[in-house]
Amino acid sequence: MAKKVPIDFVDERLNQGLAKTGLRFTAQRRHIYNTLLQKRDHPSAEEVFMRAKAEMPELSMATVYNTLDTLVKCGLIRQVTHDRGPTRYCSNLQKHHHFYCNECNGVFDIDVDPETGEPEFHMPPGFTISHWEILFRGVCPECNAKKNGAGSSRS
Amino acid sequence: MAKKVPIDFVDERLNQGLAKTGLRFTAQRRHIYNTLLQKRDHPSAEEVFMRAKAEMPELSMATVYNTLDTLVKCGLIRQVTHDRGPTRYCSNLQKHHHFYCNECNGVFDIDVDPETGEPEFHMPPGFTISHWEILFRGVCPECNAKKNGAGSSRS
DNA sequence: ACTGGATTTGGAATAATTCCAAGTCTTGAC
DNA sequence: GTCAAGACTTGGAATTATTCCAAATCCAGT
């Protein structure tokens, strides 16, 4: 089976990500990141562990958790948490949205039209939507006040 | 301290919700639902338990989980899960979106303009947004096929 | 080759939730 | 009103997901 993602690409991406934070390039990080890129189906840590361990039997669960956190910090993957249950991981860094299937609990990427930014136009056929919401992330007013206050004078 | 939400309103809502599914009106369900309505700050099951237990000491954690699930099924509250950590619950049934604070992990409702449906116009001052995405819920093509196939002929 | 710090590992510990069996309460039939 | 059946609640055990920890290993720079 041919790899969908060439290993050079994996290495380059990983190196770029790690370089930003001064972290080391290791065999485990490479292997786990590669595992994530080969099958982009939003696996849980457990699933990543099983897939990666198949080719690297010494790998430990702790390393998988550590590495996933590292990759998130490096901006190479994103955490996806839209329901009760294990956190999943997403290696698609393109701007996109998510569809959560209420039947099988599957997570699907919904791509964005790069021109307009409108996601609806790319909703693939066959999906039926029962609910949607926008999720914003950032800093709330109270925490913004704390950060600003701490930085400057505070009577 | 005056209750923000009159108990009659709580009872009526709860009765309506339970009636749809043939479930019983109980003291515990009433008390837990009332607890959720009095302070709409997206509490976790643990927080609901502590608040509710203060006035109903016999209450058990299992009942809190059972009741929260029941209320979700009745459509009286919504689960909110946007990060690793305990599930939170939202008793605001108006159409709205959510803001997740990366600093304090707080969840805030972002109301929707009932005219346009545009959330941005109601983003309260002081929030700074670092990222946003749309979350769709529904049924994926594969599960839709299964459901349709099972209902009609298949061969 | 050597040292310090980063990384990995296995297992213990914790957190969040679910499961379970026993007891209690409610409702409807009589 | 009494009784049985089923719904509901409870405490605790079990499970799942994740984090913590200390020891062993690895790596980069000297």
Image (cartoon, coloured by chain):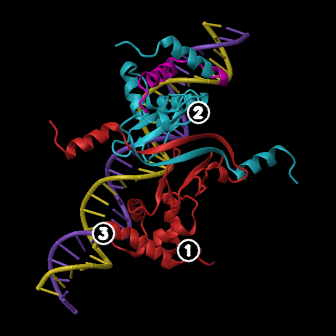
Chain colours: A cyan, B red, C yellow, D purple
| SS label for mark 2 | loop
Amino acid at dot 1: Val
**Is C28 situated above or below A28?**
below
Disc 2 crowd, CA 10 A, few/some/many (<14, 14-19, 20+): few
Q: Are marks 1 and 3 in contact (CB under 8 Å)?
A: no
Residue B38 x, y percent position in the rendering: 56, 69
Q: Which residue is mark 3?
A: B22
Q: Which residue is mark 2?
A: A116
Task: Tell me the subunit letter for badge 3.
Answer: B
Q: Which residue is mark 1?
A: B5
| SS label for mark 1 | loop
Do the residues indicated by labels 3 and 2 lie within the same chain of the protein?
no
Do the residues indicated by labels 1 and 2 lie within the same chain of the protein?
no
Please tell me which residue lies in front, A72 or B46: A72
Amino acid at dot 3: Gly
Residue at the spot 42% in from the left edge and 33% down from the top edge = A43
Disc 3 crowd, CA 10 A, few/some/many (<14, 14-19, 20+): few
Disc 1 crowd, CA 10 A, few/some/many (<14, 14-19, 20+): few
Which numbered disc, 1 or 3, marks the residue that appears first in the sequence?
1
Residue at the spot 55% in from the left edge and 36% down from the top edge = A118
